């Protein structure tokens, strides 16, 4: 494990170094040969940066723990399910359709987090948007692949940067809202991916996946 972390640290250092080298000077405009070679090198540097960022992103999500925007979303969802409502930073409040709430907490689960994050990353990597994976997988089969023999519900979204904005996007869609308000689900997994970390050519800048399951 320590060797793996050392590798990640080295990759981050190389990424930073390539940024410094790239920004030393713009490509020359007086000599076409030098300009062509410089632009080719810049393109290679950009591809290397995407590779480094992709490896770092995979490493950060491989433990199945939540952080960053995924954690932000979990906190919003947990508050909504526990209280039956959530008030955004702008003062807008969203409430349960049946004006109720879930008893107890909805816990994040490492296997569900991994299933959500891996599907999210794959949607960015292969530039598609679907509940069906490129390999034909389904939400339930992806959860089973992480060692949980349970069925699963799934929400996916793309294009919105913030956790609050994505929550509101799902809240305004009946099927997605039903998943978020289904108190039979005891656990949730959350994935968030910025396209810069995996594939800068993906169609959307931000991708989100929630996976819900009942684990007794």
Image (cartoon, rainbow, N blue to C red):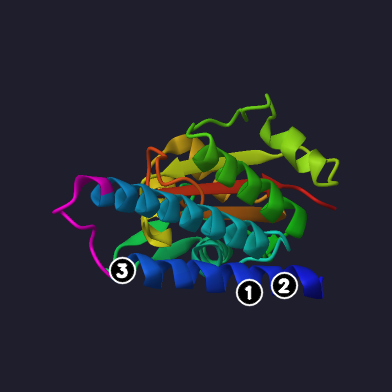
Disc on the earlier residue, 1 or 3: 1
On the question of residue 122 being in view, the answer is: yes
Task: Kindly identify which residue carries mark 3.
Answer: 23
Residue under the point 63% across and 56% down: 58
Tell which residue pokes out farthest to the top in this image.
Answer: 136
Give percent across and percent down for residue 212: 66, 47
Q: CA distance from mark 1 to mark 3?
A: 22 Å
Give percent across and percent down for residue 109: 73, 59
The secondary structure type at the circle numbered 3 is loop
What are the residue bounds of the magenta stretch? Answer: 25-33
Give percent across and percent down for residue 157: 45, 43
The local crowd at label 3, few if under 14, some if 14 to 19, many if 20 or more residues have their Cα within 10 Å, is: few
Task: Kindly identify which residue carries mark 1.
Answer: 9
Task: Kindly identify which residue carries mark 2.
Answer: 5
The secondary structure type at the circle numbered 1 is helix
Vertical position of residue 205 compared to residue 72: above or below: above
The secondary structure type at the circle numbered 2 is helix
> Is 149 left or right of 67, judged from the image as shown?
right
Looking at the image, do the residues carrying marks 2 and 1 touch, with CB atoms under 8 Å apart?
yes
Residue under the point 71% across and 55% down: 187
> Which of the two marks, 1 or 3, is nearer to us in this view?
3
Q: CA distance from mark 3 to mark 2?
A: 27 Å
Disc on the earlier residue, 3 or 2: 2
Q: CA distance from mark 2 to mark 1?
A: 6 Å
């Amino acid at each position: 494990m320590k060797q793996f972390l050392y590798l990640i640290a080295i990759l981050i250092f190389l990424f930073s170094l390539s940024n410094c080298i790239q920004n030393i000077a713009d490509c020359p405009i007086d000599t076409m040969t030098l300009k062509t070679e410089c632009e080719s090198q810049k393109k290679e540097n950009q591809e290397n940066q995407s590779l480094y960022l992709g490896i770092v992103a995979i490493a950060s999500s491989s433990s199945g723990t939540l952080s960053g925007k995924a954690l932000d979303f979990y906190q919003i969802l947990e508050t909504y399910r526990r209280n039956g409502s959530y008030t955004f930073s702008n003062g807008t409040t969203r409430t349960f359709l049946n004006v109720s709430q879930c008893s107890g907490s909805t816990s994040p689960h490492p296997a569900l987090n991994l299933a959500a994050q891996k599907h999210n990353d794959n949607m960015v990597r292969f530039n598609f948007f679907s509940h069906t994976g490129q390999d034909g997988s389904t939400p339930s089969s992806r959860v089973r692949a992480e060692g949980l023999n349970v069925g699963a519900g799934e929400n996916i979204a793309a294009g919105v940067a913030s956790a609050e904005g994505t929550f509101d996007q799902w809240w305004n869609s009946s099927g997605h809202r039903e998943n978020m308000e289904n108190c039979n689900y005891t656990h949730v997994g959350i994935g968030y991916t910025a396209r810069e970390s995996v594939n800068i050519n993906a169609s959307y800048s931000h991708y989100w996946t929630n996976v819900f399951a009942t684990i007794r």
